[in-house]
Image (cartoon, rainbow, N blue to C red):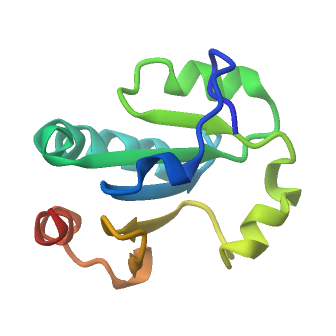
Amino acid sequence: LKDMYKQTHRLSEYEGKVVLLYFWTATDARCNNINAELKPLYEKYHDRGLEIYQVSFDPNQHMWKQRCEALPWISVFCEDGVESDMLQLYNVGHLPCLFLIDRNCDLQARQEDIIDLGEAIEALL
């Protein structure tokens, strides 16, 4: 998928890093609150190997661009929105949805399983 600068980012590019895969929409206040919570975690752990790969399912690019232009991590846009097959592929029933992937590209936790995200990330680094 492409970011706001039209650069393509593939999740596979981040093999060897701990990746927080974050499906979201800028129109949902909960998602924007999660972004605020992720900033200090990203700042703390990015240099140690954490990447956040954020996928937007917004109905239009304008709102997404406004919300993600100040974010320090990768934010890409899914043009199919909530009709995307990607949501079925990842078994996402609602937004926001987070997945924590280890350095070997193995899924370690889903949002429902994560009690303390900081501790979960720390354990994988």
| Residue 40 place in picture, x, y as percent | 18, 40
Q: Is residue 110 left or right of residue 90?
A: left
Residue 28 visible somewhere in the drawing? no
> Residue 75's spot in the image, x, y percent?
54, 35
Q: In this view, does 76 lie to the left or right of 18?
A: right
| Quarter in which the C terminus is drawn | bottom left
Q: Is residue 2 visible?
A: yes
Residue at horizontal 24%, vertical 78%?
115
Write the residue at 30% across / 54% down. 17
Image quadrant holding the N terminus, namely top right
Q: Does residue 28 lie above or below 77 as drawn? A: below
Relative to 20, say whether 1 is above or below: above
Would you place residue 21 above or below residue 48 in this image? below
Task: Depth check: give the residue in front, 15 or 46.
Answer: 15
Q: How many marks?
A: 0
Residue 18 in percent (x, y) is at 30, 58
**25 or 28: which is nearer to us?**
25
Q: In which quarter of the image is residue 100?
A: bottom left
Q: Residue at x 69, y 19 (%)?
A: 6
**Residue sitting farthest toward the bottom:** 113
Q: State left or right for residue 18 relative to residue 57.
A: left
What residue appears at the point 35 percent right and 84 percent down from the top-left corner? Answer: 113
